[in-house]
Amino acid sequence: MRHAFVLCCSIAMFGSIGTASAQDWTKSKWGPNDEIGAANYMTPELVVKAAQLVKTGKTYALGIPVDSKTPAYPPRAFKVTIVQPGQAGIPGLGPNKATYNDDIIEGWVGVGSQLDGLGHLGIEHVYYNGNKLADFADPTGLKKLGVEKIPPMVARGVLLDMAAYYKTDVVKEGTAFNVKEIEEAAKNQGVEIRQGDVVIFHTGWLSLIGKDDKRFGAAEPGLGVEGAKYLTGKGVVAVGADTWGLEVLPFEGKTVFEVHQILLAMNGTYILENMDTAALAADKGYEFLFVLGHPRFKGGVQSMINPVAIR
């Protein structure tokens, strides 16, 4: 798994986006100062409509538990250390003997279920809305496009069950979801993708964690280039999947992480990775209220998340 990830990362450093230079993607339609991209599609009216999808009150945690063994894009790692500060050798604090545990996190934010912010991936060191790396990236935190700028995501969620579409438990790696596959899967489920939606793919890929971590990290089924253009054309807020990188791998052509570039850099559309979609797919929960209040790490590139689907 590690070798495959490192290879992709190394290639990405030298790859190009093909057609990106043919269009002026550096200017956001929301103005030169915009830092939230497709989150602008979320309106109070759409939030009210999304809330009306709640009929049973059943909730689904879309985030996965994370520990030191969770597969992650190298060199990312994560661990928790539990401490009892100032309590060594005493029965407790005060006459009531109060004791407590605290936790220290050591690791990378991009482990487990995660939100990719708009400062995560660019094109030749240029990011969403024409922001150049040298102007906004700093080791102490991004000066622009930090995840703290992203508003709470409350939207209509749409699950596309690609495992059901392909009549399998786990969609084969290298399977690309493009316009044909997306439209047919949506039609089969009787759902329509609309502006302001959060679209999430179920592939069964997450079920490989703990069973075949090497296969999990070596490749994956996922969103293709034309599929990414199709969804951004629809005006979706975010696209996610139960995979570690959302887009199909091996890649469709010679470009590297082009889907990420189309979504994040060119359209300001957020990416949700390692979403736990199994229970939602089992219940055929194809339309739901999606709620995400992420940690607002100031100047952060990503956030660990646990979105909630409510039906």
Image (cartoon, rainbow, N blue to C red):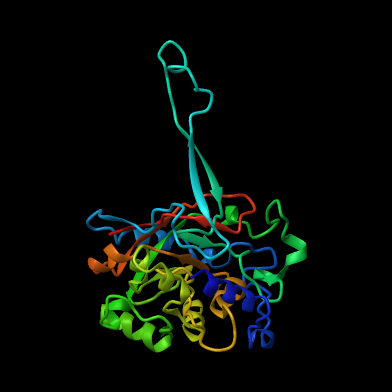
Tell me if 31 is positioned left or right of 306 in this view. right
Res 48 → quadrant = bottom left
Tell me if 283 is positioned left or right of 145 in this view. left
What quarter of the picture does the C terminus occupy?
bottom left
Query: Residue extending furthest right?
Result: 134
Compare residues 12 and 123 and report the one nearer the observer.
Answer: 12
Residue in the picture at 46% in, 62% down: 71
Residue 190 in sight: no
User: Residue 237 placed where, x, y %?
Assistant: 48, 68
User: Residue 75 placed where, x, y %?
Assistant: 58, 62
Tell me if 242 is positioned left or right of 188 in this view. right
> Is 208 above or below relative to 101?
below
Residue 100 in sight: yes
Residue in the picture at 60% in, 73% down: 9
Compare residues 248 and 33 and report the one nearer the observer.
Answer: 248
Res 126 → quadrant = bottom right
Residue in the picture at 50% in, 61% down: 115
Compare residues 12 and 276 and report the one nearer the observer.
Answer: 12
User: Residue 170 placed where, x, y %?
Assistant: 31, 76
User: Residue 68 placed where, x, y %?
Assistant: 46, 53
